[in-house]
């Protein structure tokens, strides 16, 4: 994949080495030789990943990382800390500063490409989700950044490992901050994953009676677990299987013997990333729902109705099946607003929508057409049975008074117009037009009644 990587180091030779390695994998590489220069590049350029040296004069890497994560425009840019010291304290300090990952000098080739590719992929996905979820000015990027700290780091972890002592050591290291379950059999683990879910899957690639990569493949192929972060446990010298796992979508790896602090750091990072992705997906789902649902009544809106009606009409025509459409309009609704106020008018609309849902089938589509008009689309329903639905809806609205707050009650009625698909050359627009004409015929004849285009 292609991505823009910023390499930051005060030693030119180090910069050139990393630049050459990344360029060979077709990354676009930008460079900076100090903390202030790096911040300036981040401010003016689109960056997908920052490779940041820790030990730099003036402003060290921890401070640079902290400032990147504090700035809303760059808070979601992944930062990999690069340190010459393999010290747990450095890793912890980097994570506290908001770093997403870390590498130790001399930088291992597989580790470098694994970390950069994975974070770049996540950054691109995150950017796409955020773009579709909401305009950037409406999103608090700092609150949804991958580097966010706090309770989001806690999670449920499933470890698939059949070597008891190895599993026990991992549980001992993780159980203080996470809920950990161990399974020795991959298929049992997969069933538990589907039944109970988790935030992170750790899979051994050296299982004695099974193939850990097969479990990875199954997890990635299922819709429910496709985005679940996976860390694999790898034996030294087993790089070919590691590379196959990375190609399948493994997020990270731990080389045996597993160093406790590195395990904690990598687990923490993967769970934070999952929380970040979950929040953005939830925002996207909310945004999609708002685009097709009327916020006042909870019914589908006119835009969704028109798109869906075209599809249903085409299906009915192809199959030679009936389809009916109903339009209901609240009688004298302007007088309700003028007399009782718009708050009461809104309560009436919500209660009409509720009665609308209760009086049509689950397979029918209920929509708010606009103002005080509601539409019901009823597949596989001829006009005679649609008239029964319309009468049931009319009686439901007229039969029980509406509660409007403070002990107040209001009598409300509605007029209903119906039309049925007339033949292979009928159109959605003509269907709506005929139902609308039937509605106005009901209004002219005194309201609180049901009329059809066949009347």
Image (cartoon, rainbow, N blue to C red):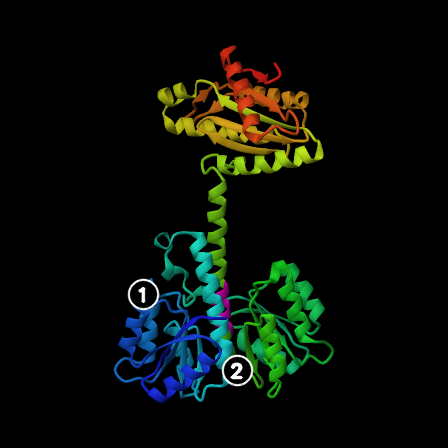
- The reply to whether discs 1 and 2 touch (Cβ–Cβ < 8 Å) is no
Q: Say which element carries label 1.
A: loop
Residue 272 on the magenta span: yes
Up-down: is 400 above or below 177? above
Q: Position of residue 447 (x, y in %)?
A: 51, 14
Q: Residues within 10 Å of mark 2 (few under 14, many from 20)?
A: few
Residue occupied by mark 1: 71
Q: Residue furthest top?
A: 445
Do we see residue 398 in this rendering? no
Closer-to-camera residue (358/295): 295
On the image, the x and y values in percent for residue 19 come to 41, 82
- Magenta range: 267-274
Which of the numbered marks, if any, corresponds to residue 110? 2
The image quadrant that residue 34 belongs to is bottom left
**Left or right position of 381 against 339:** right
x then y, percent, for residue 411: 48, 18
């Amino acid at each position: 994949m292609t991505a823009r990587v910023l390499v930051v180091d005060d030693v030119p030779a180090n910069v050139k080495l990393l630049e050459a390695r990344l360029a060979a994998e077709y990354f676009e590489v930008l460079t900076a030789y100090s903390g202030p220069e790096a911040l300036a590049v981040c401010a003016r350029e689109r960056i997908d990943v920052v490779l940041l040296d820790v030990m730099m004069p003036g402003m060290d890497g921890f401070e640079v990382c902290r400032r990147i994560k504090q700035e809303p425009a760059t808070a979601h840019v992944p930062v990999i800390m690069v340190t010459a010291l393999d010290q747990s304290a450095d890793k912890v300090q980097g994570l506290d500063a908001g770093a997403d990952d870390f590498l130790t000098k001399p930088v291992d080739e597989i580790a470098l490409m694994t970390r950069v590719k994975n974070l770049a992929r996540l950054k691109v996905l995150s950017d796409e989700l955020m773009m579709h979820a909401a305009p950037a000015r409406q999103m608090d990027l700092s609150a949804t950044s991958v580097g966010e700290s706090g309770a989001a780091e806690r999670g449920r972890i499933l470890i698939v490992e059949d070597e008891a002592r190895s599993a026990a050591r991992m549980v001992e290291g993780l159980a203080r901050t996470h809920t950990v379950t161990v399974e020795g059999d991959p298929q049992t683990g997969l069933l538990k994953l589907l039944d109970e879910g988790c935030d992170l899957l750790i899979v051994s690639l050296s299982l004695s009676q099974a193939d850990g990569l097969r479990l990875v493949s199954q997890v990635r192929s299922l819709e429910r677990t496709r985005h679940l972060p996976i860390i694999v446990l790898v034996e030294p010298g087993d790089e070919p299987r590691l590379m196959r796992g990375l190609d399948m979508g493994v997020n990270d790896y731990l080389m045996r013997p597993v160093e406790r602090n590195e395990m904690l750091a990598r687990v923490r990072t993967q769970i934070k990333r999952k929380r970040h992705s979950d929040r953005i997906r939830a925002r996207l789902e909310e945004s999609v729902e708002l685009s097709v649902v009327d916020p006042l009544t909870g019914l589908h809106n006119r835009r969704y109705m028109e798109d869906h009606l075209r599809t249903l009409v085409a299906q009915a025509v192809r199959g030679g099946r009936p389809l009916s459409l109903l339009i209901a309009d609240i009688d004298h609704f302007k007088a309700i607003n003028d007399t009782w106020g718009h708050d009461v008018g809104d309560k009436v609309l919500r209660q009409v929508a509720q009665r609308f849902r209760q009086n049509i089938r689950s397979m029918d589509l209920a929509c708010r057409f606009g103002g005080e008009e509601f539409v019901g689309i009823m597949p596989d329903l001829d006009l005679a049975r649609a008239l029964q639905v319309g009468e049931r809806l009319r009686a439901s609205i007229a039969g029980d008074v509406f509660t409007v707050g403070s002990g107040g009650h209001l009598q409300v009625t509605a007029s209903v117009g119906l039309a049925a698909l007339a033949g292979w050359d009928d159109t959605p627009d003509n269907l709506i037009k005929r139902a609308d004409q039937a509605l106005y015929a009901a209004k002219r004849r005194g309201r609180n009644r049901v009329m059809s285009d066949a009347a």
